[in-house]
Image (tube, helix red, strand yellow):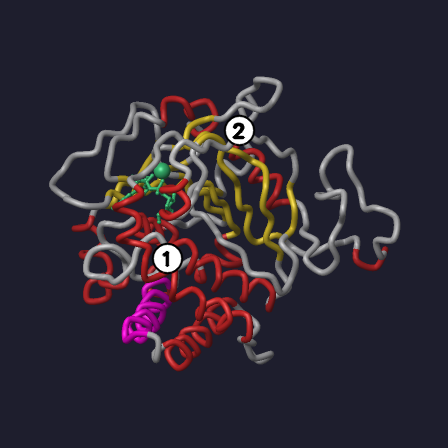
């Protein structure tokens, strides 16, 4: 059997406080890949990994041991802990998925190999500078439409592939509360590049990225225990990532592949985690929109450190938390460099 694409260049990273039985359904697609499991919560709990998978498992004790006095920059009791896996991976690509996400079926009833679609998304260019109205021009059966400048058809390298979810949509708590039974049944057969200059709400549930190109910007922030907000881990990373991919002339795609999101988390618990973010983001988004990165910064590390200082000076007035978050961003880069000399 031919090896799965990129099986030696991609790690699958799973944050978990539950069980990993969901891997059984993914076995045909995931077995050739190395898994990095980030066990959150009580490190004395044993998480069993189904037979036949090649994996590393890290719990909180491991994070403390490996990062020492900087371990505080990795969240505890929040799915944001997954970013520790990005740091310890040694591969060029990363795919991260939640443990309540299963294999979805396309309209023809076939199982969707989400990983394969993400890899296609990452290995084909993006079109951030000029929108192609027929969606992904590199997809089979599609192309650039009339009027698309030929000088721009080479596109730009893709740094992020943002997949979507059937069944339980990734709604915030207020939306979930007013629409508790809403399910996403719409399969939209499209992959689009998010235009340059536009931010987006990045969900960490079904996400792949070029770790060399943008990994150091994929810090999921300070969330969970002891922190004033949660469920903004992936959002924070997405805002930082999009500013940097725009600056470095890289692309971000969203759309296919779909996974089947099986479990709706508790909207009341979620509201307690999210509520500060719901009003903070009305100030944070304009902050990111207005922000420009220095042309002197031409790599992800220098861009991210510039962002950290701009967060410190531009958001510190909102809440002292943002000063701590800026420190966390710096500590994250120091840890990344230490683990990836
Ligand atoms: O304290 C925790 C809670 C959860 N996890 C693991 O993280 C993922 C997501 O958890 P869950 O499916 O319960 O939460 P959702 O609301 O569906 O997740 C979405 O909201 C974002 C929260 O930031 C998340 O990125 C989205 O996927 C599961 O694998 C849990 O096991 C954890 O590690 N620690
Ligand atoms: Mn979930």
Camera-nearest label, 1 or 2: 2
Residue 224 located left or right of residue 219: left
- Badge 1 or badge 2: first in the primary sequence: 2
Tell whether position 326 is magenta. Answer: yes
What range of the chain is rendered magenta? 319-336
> What residue is at 85 percent from the left and 55 percent from the top?
150
Between 151 and 129, the residue placed more toward the observer is 129
Eyeballing the image, is 234 above or below 247? above
Question: Dot 1, crowdedness within 10 Å: few (<14), some or many (≥20)?
Answer: many
Between 77 and 264, the residue placed more toward the observer is 264
Location of residue 318 (image quadrant): bottom left
Q: Which residue is mark 1?
A: 220
Q: Is mark 1 within 8 Å of ligand 1?
A: yes
Eyeballing the image, is 269 above or below 110? below
Main SS category, magenta section: helix
> What residue is at 37 percent from the left and 57 percent from the top?
220
Helix, strand or loop status at disc 2:
loop
Residue 189 located left or right of residue 64: right
> What residue is at 25 percent from the left and 31 percent from the top?
19
Position of the N terminus by quadrant: top right
From the top left corner, tell me how far across and down residue 13 is, in percent: 38, 42
Eyeballing the image, is 17 above or below 48? below
Position of the C terminus by quadrant: bottom left
Q: Which residue is mark 2?
A: 185
Quarter of image, ligand 2: top left
Eyeballing the image, is 75 above or below 263? below
Tell whether position 168 is magenta. Answer: no
From the top left corner, tell me how far across and down residue 69 is, in percent: 19, 67
């Amino acid at each position: 059997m031919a090896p799965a694409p990129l099986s030696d260049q991609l790690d699958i990273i799973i944050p978990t406080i539950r069980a990993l039985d969901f891997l059984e359904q993914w076995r045909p697609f995931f077995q050739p890949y190395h898994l990095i499991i980030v066990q959150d919560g009580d490190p004395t709990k044993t998480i069993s990994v189904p037979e036949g998978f090649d994996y590393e498992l890290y719990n909180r004790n491991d994070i403390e041991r490996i990062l020492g006095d900087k371990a505080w920059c990795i969240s505890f009791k929040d799915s944001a802990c997954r970013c520790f896996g990005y740091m310890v991976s040694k591969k060029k690509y990363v795919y991260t998925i939640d443990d309540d996400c299963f294999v979805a079926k396309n309209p023809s009833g076939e199982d969707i190999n989400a990983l394969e679609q993400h890899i296609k998304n990452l290995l084909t260019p993006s079109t951030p500078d000029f929108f192609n109205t027929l969606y992904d021009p590199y997809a089979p059966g599609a192309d650039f439409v009339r009027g698309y400048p030929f000088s721009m058809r080479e596109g730009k390298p893709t740094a992020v592939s943002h997949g979507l979810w059937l069944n339980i949509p990734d709604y915030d708590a207020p939306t979930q509360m007013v629409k508790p039974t809403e399910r996403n049944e719409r399969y939209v057969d499209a992959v689009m590049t998010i235009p340059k200059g536009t931010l987006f709400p990045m969900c960490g549930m079904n996400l792949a990225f070029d770790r060399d190109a943008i990994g150091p910007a994929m810090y999921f922030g300070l969330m969970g225990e002891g922190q004033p907000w949660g469920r903004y881990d992936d959002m924070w990373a997405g805002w930082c990532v999009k500013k940097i991919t725009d600056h470095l002339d890289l692309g971000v795609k969203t759309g296919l592949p779909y996974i089947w999101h099986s479990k709706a988390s508790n909207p009341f618990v979620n509201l307690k985690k999210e509520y500060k973010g719901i009003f903070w983001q009305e100030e944070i988004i304009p902050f990111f929109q207005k922000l420009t990165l220095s042309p002197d910064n031409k790599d992800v590390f220098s861009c991210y450190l510039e962002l950290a200082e701009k967060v410190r000076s531009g958001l510190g007035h909102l809440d002292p938390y943002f000063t701590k978050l800026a420190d966390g961003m710096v500590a994250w880069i120091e840890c990344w460099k230490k683990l990836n000399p």
